[in-house]
Every structure is written in structure tokens, then in C-alpha cells.
Image (tube, rainbow, N blue to C red):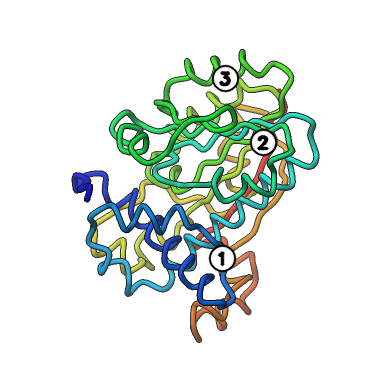
Amino acid sequence: MLKINDEISSTLLIPLYYKAKESKRAKEGKNAILNDPKAEFLVSNIEGKYEIYEKDRFSNIGCLFRAKYFDDKVRELCYQFSELVVINAACGLDSRYERLKDELKDKNIVFYNADLPEVIKIRKQFFSDNDKNFSLVGDAFDDTWIKDIKQKHKNANFIVILEGLLMYFKKSEIKQIIKNFSLLKDVYIYADLVGTKIVNKQVKHKTMSELKIDFKSGINGLDDFISLLSDVVKVKPLNETVYMKKYSFRYGLAGVFFGLLPQSFLRNFSSLVGVKIDN
């Protein structure tokens, strides 16, 4: 069984464990947000302190909701364009391709799963490349690999998924990340954001507290995101949703209550957004 060094294990294993747990729920015939057998396999082969994650219902459902949201956006764009390239930045051990491959097998779609060298080294022990799915070393602050992908797919549309990434960087760094991906032609960027109420520690998930994970930037939804980027790139707003507006019952009574609150308030905690870069 593989043991991952503690410095990177939390960011890899938190979403992985929740996806594996949900996949088991699907096998039991229960109403599940997603089905991810690959995540089950990975959890059974990677040592981790999974009991830490078990008690945090908000992180659990939140990770599942955002994964489903990004999966759905890939589906939508795949049916919209004749050639689509999906870039999962800071991919960790996510298995988006495996979740979607059967449904999209007849589509002209290619997945690139990019992360830092130490993560890709782990990933390559469990994921094999093929003509539609690749794992590669790619730092969001280095545009060399982005240019290489652009050159390889000159006629494609692109969707970049920034899942569980931006909140760990300062706003100036977020601008640089988006600027790098704006080099791609007709690029759609989808990201999850953490709002100021969480970053300012007015609210904090149990798992994050246990692991002493701190966020560096609070962005309150789509308008705030576009305002941040306005001096770097030309941005067209596409979509915004907030947690607990769907599957609120899975969070328990607190989720049902929060689900009744207006989106304008909930985006101050967290949100999922999509933009198109006008380049």
C-alpha cells in the first residue's frame, strides 16, 4: 500500500476519499451525486488518515458537488464543440476522464491532467495515458506546457478546470494563473472560490481546522472574480452557483436552512463560477 508524504497528502486524499465513499453509496443503490469506482480503488491502495475526513459533512458534500459541477460543464461543452480539450489543472488524483469516458467515447475530446512533479509521480502509478487522456507535469505559474497544448490542438476549444486551487494563492497570483491560461484559444475557465467569510475565519470546515489548512484569498462569487481579473484579461461571465442550493438535504438540517438563503449571501462563503476569456 502506498504511503504519501504528509505535506501533500491532505490536498490529494480529502476529495479522493469523499468520491470513494460516494461511489460505495451508489453501489448500494442509494441516491448518489456521482459514481467513481477509480476513487474506491485508489483509497484501497493508498494509506491515509481517512478518519479525519469522516466527520466533516460540509466538506464531504461540497467536494462531491463541485466535482459533479465541473463534470457537467465538460459534458455541456463537449456537445457544443466539434473538438474539446479539457485541462484539469492541479488535478491531484481526480479521475474525471474515467467518470466521463463511456458517455463521451464517441466525442472528439482530450483530457490533460496537470500537476506538480511529486503529484504526477504518484498519479502515474495508478493512471495510464492513452490517446484521449494524459497526465503531465504542469505548474500553473509556468505557461510553457500551456503553449505546447495550444500548439498541438490548433482548432480546438478549451475548458480549464481549477478545482480546489485558487483559494491557496494570493489575488496577484490568481491573476497570473488566469493570464497564463488566457493564452489558449476560446478558453472557458471554471473554478471554485472561497469567500471572505471563510477566509477571514468567521466560518471554517472541520477538516480544514484539523489539518491546519489556511486559505489566502477570499473571492465572493462571479462579480468579484471578474472585477479581480478585469485589468489582466477580458472576461465574459458564464455561470455562478453556490453550495447548498442543490443536495441541501445531504448536509443535514443546517444545509436545508442555508439552502433557503439567497445566493447573494451564500457566495460570501463559497461559489462555483465559469467565465470565457475574450482573446
Q: Is residue 68 left or right of residue 168?
A: right
Q: Earlier in the sequence, mark 3 or mark 1?
A: 3
Q: Earlier in the sequence, mark 3 or mark 2?
A: 3
Q: Position of residue 136 (x, y in %)?
A: 43, 27
Q: Is residue 79 above or below residue 21?
A: above
Q: Earlier in the sequence, mark 1 or mark 2?
A: 2
Of residues 226 and 122, the one drawn nearer to the viewer in this rendering? 122
Disc 3: CA contacts within 10 A as few (<14), some (14-19) or many (>=20): some
* Residue at position x 63%, y 64% in the image: 264
* Residue at position x 40%, y 33% in the image: 115
Give the residue type that dot 1 points to. Answer: Tyr
Q: Which residue, as the protein is rendered here, is positioned at the far bottom? A: 253
- Marks 3/2: CA distance? 15 Å
Find residue 188 and name its label. Answer: 2
Give the residue type that dot 2 points to. Answer: Tyr
Q: Is residue 226 left or right of residue 24?
A: right
Q: Is residue 136 above or below residue 15?
A: above
Give the residue type that dot 3 points to. Answer: Ile
Which quadrant is home to the C terminus? Answer: top right
Identify residue for label 1.
Answer: 243
Mark 1: secondary structure: loop
Q: Position of residue 191 (x, y in %)?
A: 55, 46
In the picture, residue 236 is in which quadrant? top right
